[in-house]
Image (cartoon, rainbow, N blue to C red):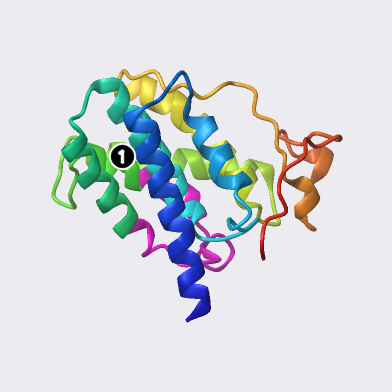
């Protein structure tokens, strides 16, 4: 029961930060949302809430940029959250598909209104997941929720620009601030690793 409450807090945190960003971006970008969530002391180093973080941030950014009404954005974000909760913990190693990559497909499906019977957008959603997963697989294991979140967002930046025509404000260079909290960190083998990490709050287990 305690674990469920903790996951609810993480999901609530993501929802709150995305709504705040949508309503008042104030010159910030998607990675600022990601940092605010990951820097929160209640947000774990590894947790399936990352499966929600990726599509939620993408939805906030794309809906903000294309002028989606707030009520519609709220409905899309609620649906993203509902679907993301169905992607189980440890999905990467136990099912062979990182939840952050599945989150890319969730975003694309909800945003485009795709269903199993869709024709034109069905492939678009599956390629979103496949492309992000391919980028993650190239980096190898063991799992790292931070690394895979960054990889997913960088892939989707290009994918969304190509297929939706929306410029997602994710910088090309992303530096990780969390390797000190990850006992399995790939360090120099990870493209996001920095030898001297910036200070970040200690995340809870």
Residue at the image point whose x is 37% and y is 57% from the top: 84
Magenta: main secondary structure equals helix
Pick out the residue farthest to the bottom.
1
User: Is residue 136 one of those drawn in magenta?
Assistant: no
Residue annotated with mark 1: 108
Residue stretch rendered in magenta on the structure = 83-105
* Foreground of the two, 48 or 20: 20
Pick out the residue farthest to the right.
195
Q: Is 131 on the left or on the right of 69, as rendered?
A: right
Q: Secondary structure at mark 1?
A: helix
Q: Is residue 152 visible?
A: yes
- In the image, residue 167 sits, relative to residue 38, either above or below, namely above
Task: Give the percent coordinates (x, y) of residue 103.
Answer: 41, 48
* Foreground of the two, 90 or 38: 38
Task: Give the percent coordinates (x, y) of residue 169.
Answer: 46, 21
Which of the 4 quarters of the picture holds residue 71? top left
Mark 1 surroundings: few (<14), some (14-19) or many (≥20) residues within 10 A: many
Residue at the image point whose x is 33% and y is 54% from the top: 81
Task: Give the percent coordinates (x, y) of residue 90.
Answer: 55, 66
User: Is residue 84 one of those drawn in magenta?
Assistant: yes
Task: Give the percent coordinates (x, y) of residue 69.
Answer: 18, 30
Which of the 4 quarters of the picture holds residue 87? bottom left
* Foreground of the two, 182 or 124: 182
Which of the 4 quarters of the picture holds residue 11? bottom left
Residue at the image point whose x is 54% and y is 31% from the top: 32
Q: Is 114 on the left or on the right of 101, as rendered?
A: left
Q: Is 16 on the left or on the right of 164, as rendered?
A: right
- In the image, residue 44 sits, relative to residue 175, either above or below, namely below
């Amino acid at each position: 029961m305690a674990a469920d409450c903790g996951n609810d807090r993480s999901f609530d945190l993501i929802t709150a930060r995305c709504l705040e960003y949508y309503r008042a971006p104030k010159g910030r970008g998607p990675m600022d949302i990601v940092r605010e969530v990951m820097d929160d002391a209640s947000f774990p180093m590894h947790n399936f809430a990352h499966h929600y973080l990726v599509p939620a941030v993408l939805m906030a950014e794309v809906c903000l940029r294309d002028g989606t009404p707030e009520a519609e954005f709220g409905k899309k974000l609620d649906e993203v959250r509902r679907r993301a909760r169905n992607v189980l913990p440890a999905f990467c190693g136990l099912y062979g598909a990182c939840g952050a990559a599945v989150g890319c497909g969730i975003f694309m499906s909800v945003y485009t209104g795709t269903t199993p019977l869709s024709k034109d957008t069905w492939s678009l959603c599956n390629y979103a997941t496949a492309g992000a997963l391919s980028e993650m697989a190239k980096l190898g294991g063991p799992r790292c929720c931070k690394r895979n979140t960054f990889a997913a967002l960088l892939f989707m930046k290009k994918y969304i620009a190509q297929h939706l025509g929306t410029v997602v404000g994710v910088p090309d260079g992303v530096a990780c601030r969390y390797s000190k909290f990850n006992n399995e960190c790939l360090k120099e083998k990870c493209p996001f690793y920095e030898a001297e990490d910036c200070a970040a709050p200690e995340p809870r287990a």
